[in-house]
């Protein structure tokens, strides 16, 4: 890669990579790609094809360091933390508490005491809503969220509102998927007690302008605390909770190359110290009696019961792994991958990107015309591509965007260019399937007749065509013949446009309607906006239309096209376009027997 990237205000907490606060340009060598080798799971085939994992926003894969740390803990150190005097408990406690120190350094917290281990972002947000909510929110207060939020940054606040009589308010989004700053500001009032928003949207990839939003809150609602849902940011760049000037920051280990079931709540100590417990039980107390119980100081106050020790140790190992990956290089790599994904998707006919945020992090949401998001995800899985489809736990956002759901591709530091190529090829293949599906629907109402049978059998039709092409002395004459046929091809384009979708992969506008008759024949009606393509469609119609499907299934159309010398008189690009037509025919012929492609 060896490219130039620009870095602003670089405070890394992993001690690598960014030089000072200068914001200057640095040269970044490509040390990211080799890190992929540390993820054993990526080196597998799915359905016989190499896995291309694009579901990183749901959960990231784990490097060997994390897997080994968890294994080592169970093999060597397994014991409960904080309580026993024996060596194993000492080692378990040391591993657990040193992970806390690593987390504090990772997000530049003032102290380890500000790090509370939870089960994940969801629990962290619930903890704040429950505990800080009990302390500071009452009837008539507002809790300001945005339309971008994940359900876990909506529902805990709604529950708080129900308990207290407070109101949940959502700042609206632009059509591109960005928070509308003015409207956000207008919703900041003397009633606003909590403002909670995501750092990065899991559904659109929108990176919020946190500094700008924070300064608005501090100015127009200084009494409010600010909570950030960092689930989708922490794996993509440096986090500095002091520089962000927020009050709480939440994230999950599993989206950061660590284990599931572990998360972090960072909070300013002076706030944590004032907050009542969330869950009661062991480890969170100072003294217990039936008269009165007093509580431990944070973070213990919020860590009732035996924690996920192995998971926390695994999180520590994930942070060690991230120490190998300087943030500027991660950013440069992910940016390059992102550009390839977006460009690739834009190049697929029938794909519509959803959202165009001003700043995007590692997520692209899209829809394929005529194919349900879930169908797309299921189809690309056949090509080894792992994607997510649906509402992504962001139903209010989907409603705002006017879609039931999207297909989501999300990448991270180990995503390779070859993954992107697999993704784009797989998505393209779903659009071809889309045409076939559409055609099936169209069949019922289409009144456009297929071309007449040109000969009693496919073989006879092929022989006649071969004879005519062989009668041309050279390639130029063959091409001329095609143009002539093109001129007399039936004019169906406008009618076909009403009931078909364009054949994917063609340079020109090509429409094909295939139907199956009750007698087991295939009929074809087609047209295009280019003369030579119309001629070619005449050839194909003469070959297949009105012929028995059983016979067509045995017939090799590609070999026939080579036999008539197609490579001599048709450019490679046109032949590639022809491929879309052939695939439709093959799918239709296969589909007749219930053979899916
Ligand atoms: N917020 C965002 C933005 C997320 O993407 C997710 C996970 N999809 C969550 C919160 C919840 O995280 P978890 O399920 O790990 O608690």
Image (cartoon, rainbow, N blue to C red):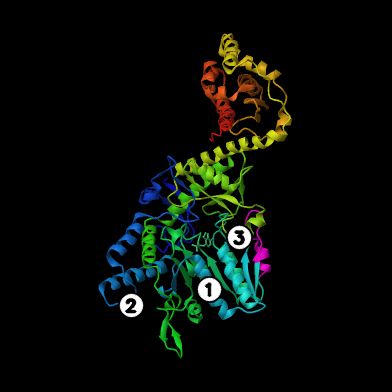
Tell me the tag on residue 83: 2
The one of 116 and 76 positioned closer to us in this rendering: 76
Q: CA distance from mark 2 to mark 1?
A: 27 Å
> How crowded is the residue under tag 1: few (<14 C-alpha within 10 Å), some, or many (20+)?
many
Determine the residue located farthest toward the left in the rendered image: 87
State the SS at label 1: helix
Determine the residue located farthest toward the bottom in the rendered image: 291
State the SS at label 3: loop
Q: Which residues are magenta?
A: 170-187
**Percent position of residue 386, x then y:** 49, 47
The one of 119 and 103 positioned closer to us in this rendering: 119
Identity of the residue drawn at 66% across and 62% down: 172
Q: In the displayed structure, does residue 553 sit left or right of residue 298?
A: right
Determine which quarter of the picture holds residue 165. bottom right
Identity of the residue drawn at 36% across and 51% down: 38
Residue contact at pointers 2 and 1, CB within 8 angstroms: no
Q: Which residue is mark 3?
A: 148
């Amino acid at each position: 890669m060896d490219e130039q990237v620009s870095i602003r205000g670089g405070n890394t907490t992993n001690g690598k990579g960014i030089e000072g606060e200068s914001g200057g340009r640095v040269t970044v060598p490509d040390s990211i790609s080799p890190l992929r080798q540390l993820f054993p799971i990526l080196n597998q085939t799915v359905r016989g094809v190499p896995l291309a994992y694009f579901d990183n926003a749901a959960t990231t894969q784990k490097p060997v360091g994390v897997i080994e740390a968890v294994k080592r803990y169970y093999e060597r150190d397994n014991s409960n933390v904080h309580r026993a005097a024996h060596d194993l408990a000492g080692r378990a406690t040391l591993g657990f508490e040193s992970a806390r120190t690593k987390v504090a350094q990772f997000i530049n917290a003032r102290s380890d005491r500000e790090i509370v281990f939870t089960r994940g972002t969801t629990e962290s947000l619930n903890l704040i809503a429950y505990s800080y909510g009990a302390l500071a929110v009452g009837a008539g207060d507002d809790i300001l969220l945005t339309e971008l939020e994940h359900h876990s940054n909506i529902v805990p606040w709604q529950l708080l509102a129900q308990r207290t009589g407070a109101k949940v308010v959502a700042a609206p989004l632009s059509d591109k998927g960005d928070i509308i700053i003015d409207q956000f500001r207008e919703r900041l009032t003397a009633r606003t007690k909590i403002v909670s928003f995501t750092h990065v949207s899991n559904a659109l990839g929108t990176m919020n302008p946190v500094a700008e939003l924070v300064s608005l809150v501090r100015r127009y609602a200084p009494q409010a605390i600010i909570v950030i849902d960092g689930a989708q940011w922490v794996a993509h760049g440096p986090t500095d909770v002091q520089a962000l000037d927020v009050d709480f920051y939440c994230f999950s280990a599993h989206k950061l190359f660590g284990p599931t079931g572990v998360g972090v709540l960072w909070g300013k100590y002076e706030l944590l110290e004032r907050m009542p417990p969330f869950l009661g039980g062991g480890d969170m107390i100072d003294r217990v009696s039936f008269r009165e119980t007093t509580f431990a100081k944070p973070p213990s106050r919020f860590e009732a019961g035996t924690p996920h020790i192995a998971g926390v140790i695994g999180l520590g190992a994930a942070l060690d792994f991230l120490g190998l990956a300087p943030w500027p290089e991660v950013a440069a790599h992910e940016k390059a991958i992102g550009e390839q994904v977006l460009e690739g998707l834009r190049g697929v006919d029938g794909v519509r990107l959803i959202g165009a945020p001003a700043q995007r992090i590692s997520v692209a949401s899209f829809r394929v015309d005529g194919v349900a998001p879930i169908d797309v995800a299921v189809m690309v899985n056949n090509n080894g591509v792992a994607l997510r489809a649906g509402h992504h736990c962001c139903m209010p956002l989907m409603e705002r965007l006017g879609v039931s759901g999207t297909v989501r591709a999300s990448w991270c530091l180990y995503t390779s260019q070859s993954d992107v190529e697999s993704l784009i090829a797989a998505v393209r293949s779903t659009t071809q399937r889309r045409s076939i599906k559409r055609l099936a629907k169209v069949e019922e109402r289409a009144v456009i007749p297929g071309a007449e049978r040109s000969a009693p059998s496919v073989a006879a039709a092929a022989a006649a065509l071969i004879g005519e092409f062989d009668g041309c002395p050279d390639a130029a004459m063959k091409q001329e013949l095609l143009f002539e046929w093109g001129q007399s091809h039936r004019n169906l384009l406008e009618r076909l446009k009403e009931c078909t979708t364009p054949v994917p992969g063609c340079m020109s506008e090509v429409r094909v309607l295939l139907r199956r008759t009750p007698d087991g024949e295939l009929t074809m009606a087609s047209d295009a906006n280019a003369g030579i393509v119309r001629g070619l469609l005449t050839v194909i119609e003469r070959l297949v239309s009105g012929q028995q499907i059983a016979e067509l299934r045995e017939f090799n159309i590609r070999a026939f096209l080579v036999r008539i010398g197609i490579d001599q008189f048709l450019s490679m690009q046109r032949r590639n376009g022809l491929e879309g037509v052939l695939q439709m025919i093959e799918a239709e012929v296969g589909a007749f027997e219930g053979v899916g492609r």
